[in-house]
Image (tube, rainbow, N blue to C red):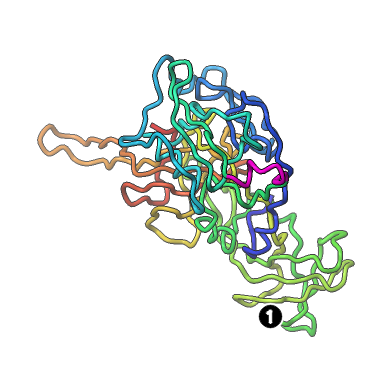
Amino acid sequence: MFHKIDSLNNWLRLAAVAVSTTLAACSLNPFGGDDEPRSAAPVTTSAPAPAGSSSMNSGATTDSYEPALVRVGEPVPLASGHPDEYVVKVGDTLWDIAATFLKDPWFWPEIWYVNPDIENPHLIYPGDVLGLVSIDGQPRITNVRASTYRLSPQARVTPLTEAINSIPYEAVASFLTTGVVLEKGEADSLPYLLSSRGAHLVAAAGNEVYVRGTGPDPVGTRFGVIKIGDPLVDPDDNRVVGYQGLWVGQGTMRRGGDPATIRLNETTREASQGDRLIPESIDIPLNFFPKAPSSQIDGRIISVVDGVTQIGQYQVVVLNRGSRDGLAAGDVLTVFRYGEKIKDRIGGGSVKLPDEAAGTVMVFKVYDEIGYGLVMEATEVIHIHDAVRNPI
């Protein structure tokens, strides 16, 4: 429920060692075995819906909605100059690989075909050879040859940290270290700083502070400390959907109770009464398929991590749509610049120019009313309040 990771090293420790298992060949998601299954929902492809998203990602849909990307009897458009085979390299992402074969990477679920003879065929690893083949007259991409260590009889345990992620970890590093956004109502429920030890008005690294609301957390628990900043307003209806958070620092619980005592280990600004505490880390899945949303999405960019005004590739943006709107991790959206309204000096009156596509965003984390997306492509400069809609 919180939107923060303080340390890249701590986040990397979330990767576990998984026993390689041969999964059902009918699944289209190479990461389908790594997360909890999502609730059933209408899908936008002709293939079965990929599993693997958190259950909180299933959102409301309407019976009247007809997916815009259903391809009946049409082949998925391939990329110009696509290879017949591709050897997966360290540093690749699923988005990069999909774009190597496909004109539109979000059609990947329609043509992925797992090889049941390969250990853990739902994951893609460096050294694997992916091939473009024809199955029942349709183009399919399959893992035609696994890397040698996966084929070895002794290689029965495979670290998930070696698997190819959908998006580059480095690209969301700013979100993991500075991207604090709280949903509306969340701030009041968080533990808060009551006082500094020694009656100081403010505290910094090396000081101890008293806090309330931490509950039964054990000694040694680490927390991030934030100040509540400006509200995030949904431009569609002027509702406050969240708050910007200003990163103060992080600390460790030295003594439990009410109030509890926390030592500030590092700070970037002074901590003061009323500052809030959040868990040190959250799980951000990076393994999912790029895909079109399972419901009609029409939202806006309402914030950007790092506070820049002009948004480019690999920057993290906050959207005013979340799981209740049907948005899920892996969903791909097209960004549109709103067309200006100009005077028609010849025919008279005013005319609104068409909205123009400006880039592509992949959603990597969703909450009830907001979602986080990574800008994968930016054909034009993107701005706050630009629209995000189902891909075209």
Where's residue 354, x and y in %?
28, 35
Residue at 87% across, 72% down: 255
Left or right relative to 162: residue 74: left
Quadrant assignment for the C terminus: top left
Residue 7 x, y percent position in the rendering: 64, 65
Farthest residue, direction front: 153
Q: In the image, what residue occupies the spot 72% across and 51% down? A: 16
Residue located at (75% from left, 65% from top) = 192
Question: Is the residue marked by circle 1 packed among few (<14), some (14-19), or many (20+) residues within 10 Å?
Answer: some
Q: Which secondary structure lies at badge 1? A: loop
Q: Is residue 318 above or below residue 55?
A: below
Residue 271 against residue 53 in the figure, above or below: below
Nearer-the-camera pick, 320 or 8:
8
Tell me the kind of residue under disc 1: Ala
User: Quick one: 339 or 21, which is closer to the camera?
Assistant: 21
Q: Is residue 220 left or right of residue 8?
A: right
Position of 109 relative to 204 (above/below): above
Residue 158 included in the magenta stretch of the image = no
Residue at the disc numbered 1: 205
Left or right, 152 with respect to 189, comes to left
**Camera-side residue: 58 or 135?**
135
Nearer-the-camera pick, 171 or 13: 13
As drawn, is 306 to the left or to the right of 193? left
Q: Position of residue 10 (x, y in %)?
A: 68, 62
Which stretch is magenta? 148-156
Residue 260: x %, y % from top left: 85, 69
Write the residue at 72% across / 44% down.
Answer: 156
